[in-house]
Image: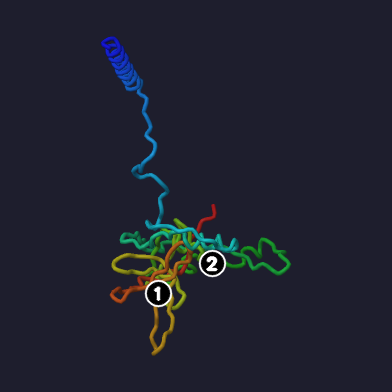
């Protein structure tokens, strides 16, 4: 009986020593043991809406439309800091331009028939006109791209459909001014983004809209 007890105790001690040595080898070798099962922190697919999702069946023809609708829109491009440059007409910029006939046949004399002064053509009110470099794509479909420069005339009165530099709560934005006639001779004013990825701006009751100036020209380099 004593021999059986000693035999069992020997093998138990041997197994304990073996496991201890194996554990030391794993730690010394730098092997990281992966733990499977259970909830891991920050695991799983991240969702934009941070709420439970459901599975639904939709017509195949509507899949792209629904995906576009669910696509998160960028935040509005209101900015507190903009850099406006005043216009300085120091020299005349007379550029010759031709009077091209319908058959496209013209000579050197035709080419120098008249001149155009870019100062007068682009800037009607030099003292109230400023240059602004665009830092947003919210007006892309109106032909205003990132880093384009636009001319803004403060002396003009903005009308429906004009592209304006607007000021809301000390923040600037370039948008299309929309004026919609409502009942009882009221007018609804809002700012339209010319890019479906950007939100339109609808004023709240406590918000005040100031039209800083009207965009009169886009300065765009092709090369």
SS of the residue at dot 1? strand
* Disc on res. 116: 2
Crowd class of label 2 (few under 14; some 14 to 19; many from 20; radius 10 Å): few
Write the residue at 29% across / 66% down: 170
Q: Residue furthest left?
A: 2
Write the residue at 30% across / 74% down: 208
Please tell me in which quadrant of the rendered image residue 213 appears.
bottom left
Q: Position of residue 201 (x, y in %)?
A: 39, 69
Closer to viewer: mark 2 or mark 1: 1
Q: Which residue occupies the foreground of this view, 141 or 41?
A: 41
Q: Which residue occupies the foreground of this view, 58 or 144?
A: 58
Crowd class of label 1 (few under 14; some 14 to 19; many from 20; radius 10 Å): some
Please tell me in which quadrant of the rendered image residue 83 appears.
bottom left
Q: Which residue is mark 1?
A: 190
Q: Position of residue 85 (x, y in %)?
A: 36, 61
Q: Which residue occupies the foreground of this view, 176 or 106?
A: 176
SS of the residue at dot 2? strand
Write the residue at 42% across / 85% down: 182
């Amino acid at each position: 009986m004593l021999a059986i007890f000693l035999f069992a105790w020997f093998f138990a001690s041997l197994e304990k020593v073996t496991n201890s040595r194996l554990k030391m080898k794993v730690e010394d070798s730098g092997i990281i043991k992966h733990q499977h099962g259970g909830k891991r922190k920050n695991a799983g697919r991240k969702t934009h809406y941070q709420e439970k999702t459901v599975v639904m069946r939709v017509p195949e023809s509507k899949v792209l439309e629904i995906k576009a609708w669910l696509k998160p829109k960028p935040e509005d491009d209101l900015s507190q800091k903009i850099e406006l440059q005043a216009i300085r007409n120091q020299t005349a910029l007379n550029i010759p331009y031709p009077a091209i006939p319908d058959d496209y046949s013209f000579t050197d004399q035709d080419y120098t028939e008249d001149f155009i002064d870019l100062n007068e053509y682009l800037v009607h009110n030099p003292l109230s006109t400023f240059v602004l470099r665009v830092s947003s794509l919210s007006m892309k479909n109106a032909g205003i791209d990132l880093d384009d420069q636009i001319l803004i005339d403060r002396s003009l009165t903005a009308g429906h459909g004009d592209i304006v530099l607007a000021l809301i709560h000390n923040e600037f934005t370039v948008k299309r001014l929309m004026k919609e006639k409502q009942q009882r001779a009221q007018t609804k004013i809002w700012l339209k983004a010319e890019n479906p990825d950007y939100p339109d701006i609808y004023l709240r009751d406590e918000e005040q809209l100031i039209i800083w100036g009207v965009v009169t020209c886009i300065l765009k380099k092709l090369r």
